[in-house]
Amino acid sequence: MSTDPTPFAGTLLGATIAAIAPRDTAAERAARERLDRMTKPPGSLGVLEDVAAQLAGTAGACPPPLPEPAVVAVFAGDHGVHAQGVTPWPQEVTAQMVANLAGGGAVVNAFAAQLGAEVVVVDVGVATPVGPAAGLLERTVRRGTADLSVGPAMTLAEARQAVEVGIEVATTLAAGHGCLVTGDMGIGNTTASAALVCAFTGAAPAAATGRGTGIDDPTLARKVEVVTRAVARVPGRPATPEAALAALAELGGLEHAALAGFVLGAAAARVPVLLDGVIAGAAALVAAALCPAALEHALAGHTSAEPGHGLALHALGLRPLLGLDLRLGEGTGALLSLPLVASAARALRDVATFDSAGVTEK
């Protein structure tokens, strides 16, 4: 734990960390008590009762507001480690997919339309300019990271700037939305994710590194070697916010940094944030190291097929709501969990108690 009571003083990151408080225990206790009085056997909604109580604790009210409208923020960036042949996909696909996302043609757009959610795309570090488009926020910190296999992916200043992009986006979106959802886009970003998972959990690179978009065995072996080499530069698991930012700068992507800030910004605004797959999981590890209380306001939408994601969720103590073997990113898995979260909140608000309904208890 950090001995500095005010890390990053005088910055937006520092102010955001200072503004984050744990969940409201009184509201959470009231939610648990109401859940037990509702017209159902105690505990019969299983994990959804935990979700309902958590939402009450985040809002500081029982019942909490419904988590609507929801918005997915898809943070996009490119990765210098692409030069190491860790993926067969060309780097220009990132910019092409950002344009597709902004144009409404990606899977996350379809899922969001089905659920009545909004999609915002944030260019925090795409290698080639995408150009103005509706639904696209241009917040470029740099045009892609450096190659994490040979040196730091970013400077400390760039890492903090990217985190603060995420904070600003979360703060803006929280003003008009009841739930924030993480999304990502970036060719090569599962390599950076695996490196972050290893650095923050102590996991072995071979255990944390997956096939991403579906790479073959030789490419996977090369990817593991790259992650091993990069993680060796980080001196132990980060134990302070300053060390967390340094590890992020060394190994992470610009979208990881922005997603970490997005989690922090949501927590400061007391709005629940649904985490997507391994990219969000790696970013959440960074956010937790920057401010542990921030993760009290996060929910794991699903667990992906990437092995590093399960390791990240275990380290964070988060239970995924879905397990569908998804590995797309974009925010798709988190979005699919949104009806479960909304149903938990609505049940807490709308279901009668035994007393109010005149139902005899056992």
Image (cartoon, helix red, strand yellow):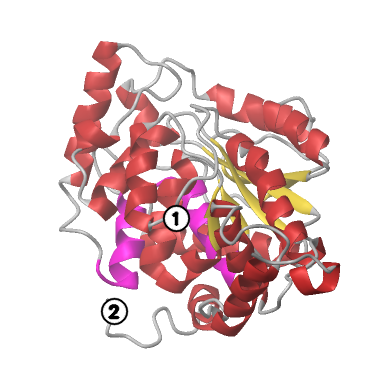
The residue located at (23%, 39%) in the rendering is 150
Q: Spatial distance from mark 2 to mark 1, Cα to Cα?
A: 18 Å
Q: Quadrant of the N terminus?
A: bottom left
Residue at image location 66% in from the left, 41% down from the top: 335
**What's the amino acid at mark 1?**
Ala
Q: Is residue 8 above or below residue 290?
A: below
Look at the image and say whether residue 266 sits in the magenta stretch: yes
**Residue 13 appears left or right of 65:** left
| Label 2 vs 1, first from the N-terminus | 2
Could you say whether the residue bearing mark 1 is in a helix, strand or loop?
helix
**Is there any visible trace of residue 132 in the rendered image?**
yes
Q: Position of residue 290 (x, y in %)?
A: 40, 69
| Residue 2: mark in rendering | 2
The one of 30 and 106 positioned closer to us in this rendering: 30
Q: Position of residue 36 (x, y in %)?
A: 62, 68
Q: Is residue 33 left or right of residue 261?
A: right
Q: Report the disc number at residue 284.
A: 1
**Extent of the magenta region:** 239-267
| Residue type of the residue flagged with mark 2 | Ser
Q: Which mark is residue 123?
A: none
Q: In the rendered view, does 357 fall on the left or right side of 38?
A: right
Residue 147 visible to an observer of this rendering: no
Residue 179 on image: x %, y %: 70, 57
**Total residue callouts:** 2
Name of the residue lying farthest toward the bottom: 5
* 241 relative to 337, above or below: below
Nearest the viewer among 338 and 271 is 338
